[in-house]
Amino acid sequence: MTPTATGPGGDATGLVTDTIEFSPVDGPGNRFVVFLQGCSFDCVACHNPYTIQACIDCGACVPACPSGALTVDLGRMHWDEDLCTGGDACVAACPHDSTPKARTRTVADLLGRIRLAAPFLSGVTVSGGEATQQPGFVAELFTAIRQDPALAGLTCFIDSNGDCSPQVWERLLPVTDGVMVDLKCLDPDIHRRMTGQPNDAVRASIRLLAAAGRLHEVRLLMLPGINDADDLVAATGRWLAEVDPRMRVKVIGFRHHGVRPSPLPLVEPTDAQRRHYAEVLSAYGAFDVTVV
């Protein structure tokens, strides 16, 4: 399925993997998070690999479902949410990095869910997958949030891999308060090994967002032995300082949870290693560094 945004307001639709009503880790404050299906990267360290591709209705997951919530009818997958017990056997059985549980949602549907949680929220974050793969839907959702009196004061954020064109940002920035961007690696060859794609667009996005005053945070996922050499971390610090020497930077140590088997040696860094990365970065700018 190809997600589309059809017309203004509540009729716009997007392919949504899931939503979380309250999250303290997806932007500032307590946030309602919308996860969109589909991503332009194929990261070796992805914690949500089932969000990479759209379901192709192959039916490989049907026998794995213990509750009979999955069926194929006329060549299309159907998921019965009432029968689903909430397990991930279907996701584990999928050979295509997808999920049969992604649903087409309207802006109006999401607005209703956000309104229920609004008194306890600081804002809404669209993540993924990759949020910028469905820019029309994101723009319509954020526009509707800003126009809804019941949602006054909620900020609209995007969690992105940065792999999109300036034209996409031009469409999104007028209704976006901030963007968190993952920089997997400054070195283009290592970046391609980690994601399957070059990093030119990512670097351009970071510069564009910083210049527009919308870059909330750059996130650095650190994998020992792959992208954590001191000279590479130092080069990253120098480059980030050129963009904005006071930017917010989050150093994230790799964790195995949810990650697929990989030909690369994926190792979790120690607490001491994570602190060391932050120290190396901080030598090149007055960054606001968080280590997790």
Image (cartoon, rainbow, N blue to C red):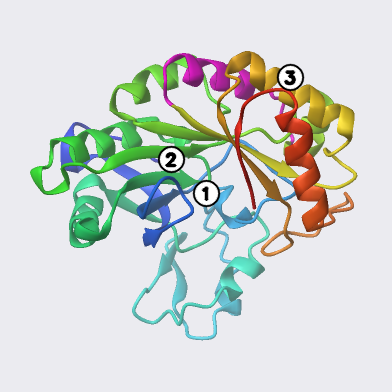
Mark toward the start of the polypeptide (3 vs 1): 1
The numbered mark, 2 or 3, whose residue comes first in the sequence reads: 2
Residue 63 in the image: above or below residue 198: below
Q: Give the range drawn in magenta.
A: 196-214
3 and 1 marks in contact (CB < 8 Å): no
| Most frequent secondary structure within the magenta stretch | helix
**Label 1 amino acid?**
Ala
Name the residue type under label 3: Arg
Residue under pointer 2: 2
- Relative to 127, does residue 246 appear above or below in the rendering? above
Label pair 1/2, CB-CB below 8 angstroms: yes
Residue at 81 percent across and 53 percent down: it is 272
Q: Which mark is residue 54?
A: 1
Secondary structure, mark 1, is loop
Q: Which of 271 and 259 is in front in this view?
A: 271
- Between 49 and 185, the one lying in front of the other is 185
Q: Earlier in the sequence, mark 1 or mark 2?
A: 2
Q: Disc 3 or disc 1, which is closer to the eye? A: 3
Q: Is residue 20 visible?
A: no
Q: On the picture, is 27 further left or further right than 260? A: left
Instruction: Give the x, y percent position of residue 194.
Output: 77, 39
